[in-house]
Amino acid sequence: MFAKVEKQRNGIELIKIDNQETTIVFSNFGARIISWKYDDNSIVLGNIVEADEFYQANPFKFGATIGRYSGRIADATFELDGKTYTLDQNDGENNIHGGPHGLDTKFFDYEIYEQVGQVKIIFTTIIKSEDDHFPGNIELKVTHTYNVEHKWTVEYEAIATEKTLFNPMNHVYFNLNRDNNIIDNHYISSEKLALYPLGDNNLVSSLDPIDLKACFDTDKIKFKDIFETTHPQLQQQMTRYNGLDHPFDINDGQMTIENKHFLLKVETDMPNVVIFTFNDTSSWQSNFNIYKPHSGFTLETQCIPNDINLEGENAQSIIEANKPFYSKTSYKIFEKEI
């Protein structure tokens, strides 16, 4: 395996990794994934040819590292150790994905390590309190590793100068269809699939989740069946949001997503997965926006959004000053025999 760097305009650099049947491409802008192909089949959404124009004005944050806090924080405020912090409101009255100066907007430094059976790219940056109004600065390392088994692994390592919040994830959109048609035909599977309902402004309204296994009497559930459910509470959620934008509890950090061609296996040590089925694609007024609703889905491994206001001092996104943070998520792709 080997990596090749391509420099485009606007400071964007692409790191391309070739692994026979599969290729994968990352960028210094947002420490993001740009492309992942199995043979000629794109399994993530993105634009490798015109990355220098596609990504910087894109509101959907395709493939980006997100932080310092993934998801929404209600009213852009939270309390920590008796002090109230006021953040930027960049999603109505809420803060989302760390604010307007989040990690998805940053150019990372990086180093490439070609190793036996894998390529490792270590991206580094500093998150500054003056940029996002959270307490403390964070030294951050995001490592993307790709190996001969077609497994992409993301590791997050962080050290904060003060007690603060840290809730990173990657905002990649998958689509396993060979024709990139809508993803309603995909199945999600885990021994536990519990969905947290949303209330106003896409915020979690209850920490009492809906057990999808009980709703559908199976642990392998088609997206279309979720979208078209007659289960009263779940139907209300689908009608309101035109699909999923919900945190899930899954079994032991493991789940799979599949169609008739491919199976994607996910493993994570983060407590939740937010599945977003790209329900409204209209906000990006650009010739690059070729996407219709349900063109892709995210698997955002993270703490439950707004946990600091839902759970207070018990929020899992709280990290202590000078105490190392580490998290790891992997995505492994398999081609099915038909």
Image (tube, rainbow, N blue to C red):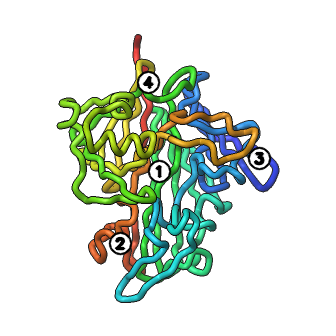
Residue at horizontal 67 percent and vertical 50 percent from the top = 58
**Distance (Cα) linking label 2 and label 3:** 37 Å
Of labels 2 and 1, earlier in sequence is 1
Q: Nearer the viewer, residue 9 or 274?
A: 274
**Distance (Cα) linking label 3 and label 4:** 30 Å
Q: Which of 65 and 140 is in front in this view?
A: 65
**Quarter where residue 90 is shown:** bottom right
Counting from the top left corner in percent of width and height, residue 66 is at 53, 58
**Quarter where residue 208 is shown:** bottom left
Of labels 3 and 4, earlier in sequence is 3
Residue 32 relative to residue 335: left or right: right
Q: Name the residue beneath numbered marker 3.
A: 53
**Distance (Cα) linking label 2 and label 4:** 39 Å
Q: Name the residue beneath numbered marker 2.
A: 309
Q: Name the residue beneath numbered marker 1.
A: 154
**Distance (Cα) linking label 3 and label 1:** 25 Å
Residue at horizontal 56 percent and vertical 56 percent from the top = 122
